[in-house]
Amino acid sequence: MLDVAIIGGGPAGMTAGLYTTRGGLKNVVMYEKGMPGGQIMNSSEIENYPGVAKVMSGIDFMAPWPEQCQRFGLKHEMINIQRVSKNEDGTFTILKDDGTTEQALSVIVATGSTPRRAGFKGEDEFFGRGVSTCATCDGFFYKDREVTVIGGGDTALEEAIYLAGICSKVYLVHRRDSFRAAPSTVERAKKIENIEFILNSTPDEVFGDNMGVQGIKIKTPDGIRQLDTPGVFVFVGHNVNNEVLKQEDGSFLCDTNEQGQVIVNLRMETSVPGLFAAGDIRLDAPKQVVSAAGDGATAGVNAISYIMEHR
Ligand code: FAD
Ligand code: NAP
């Protein structure tokens, strides 16, 4: 029987692992389906984590986190978790992708969120062949070429700035004329000569051939405009990864809101005793590394208290 099963190895999951193991729990496993680090690994830069004044890529920023957690005894298994369910005795069953199960006294769900698709024609067909949601991963393929960026949030603006340093031109297509992104980031982008803003406009259709994307048609207030860019980067927000909480009958293990975000209190407790949620998956998450890590610490500390009471 595990003390705590942590699902997800992003900033929230790893910090929960650090706090539970450093706080004295001996048998804590973090299940992560890919490399630990979470979605910030896709970011070209992070500059707002307190105490880290140097601007770094997401990969460099996250590099020391796993070692720090493992130093205190956190175990890591690279596997996708299909489902978490509650047993009659109050413990939890963790169902893994290989069909095996594990039992745990407490569970911290920190599965984060996933980039959303914008829903235009050709987006799925050309995904990975010119349509991308990761500038750090794919930007270099378009060195000295033109690309289109879709979205008006922090991710779209920051990644447009990053791409402008590699590509000859960046068209930033946003459906409104005001932005969700921080005003300072918008100002920074506006000062960059090779970023052209196309506002009040939406993607209509991406087109290409067997080799990949050749361009995108945009619906603008003046009609359809064609951008012959071989790269199209879509940054239109995220969906929460709540599948692990879905039970066989389709219901969620704990209370969620209409967007599927997990409802928690200030202790990161869900509506089910012993089940905690931390980071981007919870309601009203500020969707920041620092707050995800803070949630992970809060969940970890309270999971220890729960186990002390229920062991
Ligand atoms: P995530 O980072 O999403 O991690 C969740 C992990 O769970 C993932 O590694 C995933 O593989 C794993 N997982 C999911 N489901 C399962 C499963 N069923 N089984 C096993 N593992 C699973 N924030 C900032 O503070 N500053 C920034 O500059 C910044 N820039 C960003 C730039 C980009 C491009 C993006 C996408 C985000 C950025 N953010 C930034 C936001 C920040 O990355 C997130 O808020 C933060 O990573 C959330 O952490 P998390 O641990 O909750 O979830
Ligand atoms: P976001 O803030 O939700 O912005 C999504 C953008 O995409 C919005 O501008 C939205 O337009 C647009 N959009 C949504 N659906 C669309 C569609 N179908 N077609 C066209 N456009 C569409 O998402 P995000 O930028 O990924 O940021 C997510 C969170 O991470 C935010 O809380 C953000 O602050 C945080 N983050 C922070 C940093 C940082 O602190 N430096 C960096 C990156 C991300 P509307 O505005 O019209 O809705």
Image (cartoon, rainbow, N blue to C red):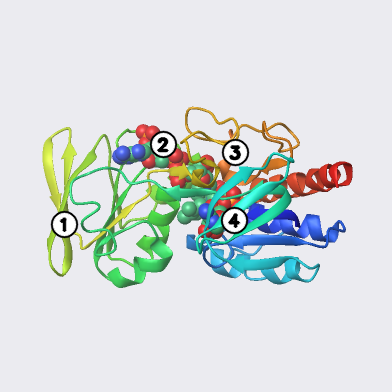
> Label 3 vs label 2: CA separation?
24 Å
Residue 161 location in percent, x, y? 41, 56
Residue situated furthest top in the rendering: 258
Mark nearest the camera among 2 and 1 is: 1
Residue neighbourhood size for the residue with mark 1, other residues' Cα within 10 Å, grouped as few (<14), some (14–19), many (≥20): many
> Label 2 vs label 1: CA separation?
24 Å
Q: Earlier in the sequence, mark 3 or mark 1?
A: 1
Q: Which mark is residue 282?
A: 3
Residue type (three-letter) at the residue carrying disc 2: Phe
Ligand 2 near label 2 (Cβ, under 8 Å)? yes
Q: Earlier in the sequence, mark 3 or mark 4?
A: 4
Residue neighbourhood size for the residue with mark 3, other residues' Cα within 10 Å, grouped as few (<14), some (14–19), many (≥20): many
> Label 3 vs label 1: CA separation?
37 Å
Circle 4 sits in a helix, a strand or a loop, which is it?
loop
What residue lies at 35% left-to-right and 66% top-to-bottom? 139
Query: Dot 4 corresponds to which residue?
Result: 8
Mark nearest the camera among 3 and 4 is: 4
Q: Does residue 44 appear in this view?
A: no
From the viewer's side, name the closer residue of 69 and 144.
Answer: 69
Q: Is residue 10 above or below residue 283?
A: below
Left or right of 29 on screen, residue 242: left
Query: Dot 2 corresponds to which residue?
Result: 179
Q: Is residue 220 above or below residue 116?
A: above
Ligand 1 near label 4 (Cβ, under 8 Å)? yes
Q: Earlier in the sequence, mark 3 or mark 2?
A: 2
Q: Is residue 258 above or below residue 189?
A: above
Residue 71 quadrant = bottom right
Mark nearest the camera among 3 and 2 is: 3
Query: Dot 1 corresponds to which residue?
Result: 215
Residue neighbourhood size for the residue with mark 2, other residues' Cα within 10 Å, grouped as few (<14), some (14–19), many (≥20): some
Left or right of 104 on screen, residue 24: right
> Label 2 vs label 4: CA separation?
31 Å
